[in-house]
Image (spheres, helix red, strand yellow):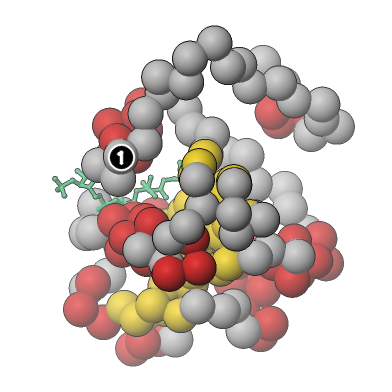
Amino acid sequence: VNPDDVTVHRQLDPARIGDLVELFRSAWWARTRDPAEVARAVAGSDLVVALVHEPDDRLVGFARVLTDFTYLATILDVIVAPDGRGAGLGARLMDTLVGDPDLAAVRSVELVCQPDLLPFYRQWGFTDQVGRSTLMRRTTDAGLIG
Ligand SMILES: CC(C)(COP(=O)(O)OP(=O)(O)OC[C@H]1O[C@@H](n2cnc3c(N)ncnc32)[C@H](O)[C@@H]1OP(=O)(O)O)[C@@H](O)C(=O)NCCC(=O)NCCS
């Protein structure tokens, strides 16, 4: 994937839900998601960024945000297609979200990641120094348990 051929979209065309399900298959926490649930989750998100490879009109990157636009925003599902990784597209997703005017006044932006991605997110000022805070979760998602 040539990053010069990739454009940033601020919405996900419903016609691309199948592409997104396919992209999710490359991410360990989203592998089993089905189209109807993915469509509902996208519709229920406050901000969406989609990267489209124009020559073949293919979704090659995605991220979304849930937020109250004031105190908290949570970045979710940051994914670049396997054949597009290492070319700056993940940075394009993060630059777009972190630079979004709708998030400029939000006090805290949070995300959950695996330890190997700490250096990636530190580039945008994220830290794992969160005082005495600890993530707690109540889930029915077997993939998120230990
Ligand atoms: C994580 C992910 C989104 C990064 O996207 P990418 O397009 O490969 O990243 P980029 O090419 O934009 O990398 C930007 C910079 O971050 C660095 N970087 C990328 N992945 C990194 C990692 N795992 N650890 C440390 N640095 C990393 C790159 O070296 C690059 O640095 P540079 O500008 O100095 O060259 C992508 O690898 C991915 O989709 N992974 C699978 C899904 C996933 O785990 N998502 C994160 C969920 S929390």
Where residue 61 sits: x, y (%)? 44, 64
| Ligand 1 occupies quarter | top left
Tell me if residue 126 can be seen: yes
Mark 1 — residue?
125
Residue at 59% x, 54% y: name it: 70
Camera-side residue of 104 and 134: 104
Camera-side residue of 92 and 19: 92
Q: Is residue 35 left or right of residue 13?
A: right
In the picture, which quadrant includes the C terminus?
top right
Residue at 25% x, 42% y: name it: 123
Where residue 86 sits: x, y (%)? 24, 52
Camera-side residue of 144 and 124: 124
Q: Residues within 10 Å of mark 1 (few under 14, many from 20)?
A: few
Tell me if residue 84 can be seen: no
Image height of 56 relative to 69, above or below:
below
Q: Is residue 146 left or right of residue 40?
A: left
